[in-house]
Image (cartoon, helix red, strand yellow):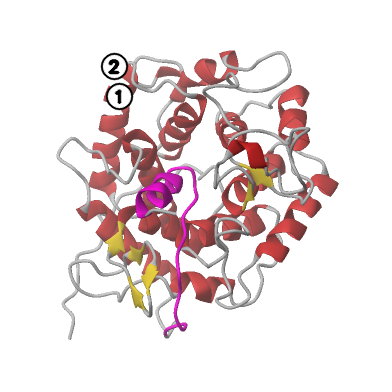
Amino acid sequence: MTSARLRKAVASGAVLALIVAVPTQAASKTKRARIAARFVASQQAADGSIVTFSVVGSTADAVMSFVAVGRGKGAIQEAIGFLRDEVKAGNVIGVGVASKVLMAAYAAGKDPTGFGAHDLVAQIENAEQLDGRFGDTEFSYVYDQALALLALEAAGIDPSAEAVAWLEEAQCGDGGWQFDQPSGPNDDGECFDEASGSDFNSSDSNTTALAVQALEVSEGTEMVVSDAFGYLEALRDSEYGGWGYTATFPTTDANSTSLVIQAYAAAERLKPQGSMGALISLQHRLCGKKGGAFGFTFDGKKKTPPDAGATIAGMVGLLKKPFPIRPRTVTKPAPKPKQCR
């Protein structure tokens, strides 16, 4: 798989990474997350966006991570301004991205029913089809369905029984969910359809972890959730202790590991021993201009350069905070970098 394709998967919570031996964990996870916030803030563009792959989606993700950490007041304000302008300009169209923006607005204490002179809640509610699916089969995905349920939770709205059932019934035979389409008649137990020719057309840790979080806030069926954890336990990288994207790409990565840790937190389950250490192992040292950033992957025994997308994900993973991120007034800026000695 090419690096470009893997980076595209990051926008959906899908990324491949390698990991080396666990470094010292003397610094608290809260401190690590706060220092990571400084790196993300340093990546903010003049228009307020923070670009990883999806400019709107990644900026919304960054807002939620800043709020979760409680640092980055100025960065949040600028990012919210960018998101508001994008909504007003009519650039927030898909169910998934609209759901992320709604959750970002909610986390930042903004009214999603009048965000950028637009009602994001109504936009998502109006996208629900008769069978409970949000959006149509061409431009919405299983991943988006989970995001929509989480966004409705943030808005204080109980999703329809049909919407919850649609997500449950999309589950693959192995207990996971795949990113794009629900389990179909031509799929194997991992939702893989050989005719598709896609490396991502199978159950994956990212969609599964997000589905678990959505079903937890939407009162989904306990057996469905239990099966999901069975899948995640089987998928866990036995060598490095975290999670990769799929059984085909099983090596621990920051985005997948963070999302799975969030799922365990949402279900109030004890995370497997060593999984947090696996996530911390992907974080660069805490000092210097790029201190606290997470690497996208590893090249041999070395971390690849600091990556904003992996760092945004790593922040909420360190804090074990599931979606939606609850509102919090952030009054402090991101920490200043400390010089390495």
Residue 87 placed where, x, y %?
Answer: 34, 21
Q: Look at mark 2 in the image and give the residue it sits on.
A: 89
Which mark is drawn over residue 86?
1
Q: Is residue 46 magenta?
A: no
Kind of residue indicated by mark 2? Ala
Q: Residue furthest right?
A: 223
Query: Residues under labels 2 and 1: Cα distance?
Result: 5 Å
Query: What residue sits 68% from the left and 26% below the top?
Result: 159
Magenta span: predominant SS is loop
Q: Quick one: 169 or 321, which is closer to the camera?
A: 169
Kind of residue indicated by mark 1? Glu
Residue 321 shows in this picture: yes
Query: Magenta region: which residues?
Result: 3-23
Query: What residue sits 47% from the left and 60% below the top?
Result: 16
Q: Quick one: 181 or 233, which is closer to the camera?
A: 181
Q: How dense is the environment of label 1, judged by Cα within 10 Å: few (below 14), some, or many (20 and up)?
A: some
* Dots 2, 1 in contact, CB < 8 A: yes
Residue 275 left/right relative to 174: left
Residue 122 placed where, x, y %?
Answer: 53, 15
Q: Quick one: 279 or 62, which is closer to the camera?
A: 279
Image quadrant containing the N terminus = bottom left
Q: Quick one: 37 or 239, which is closer to the camera?
A: 239
Helix, strand or loop for disc 1? helix
Res 198 quadrant in image:
top right
Residue 24 placed where, x, y %?
Answer: 42, 85
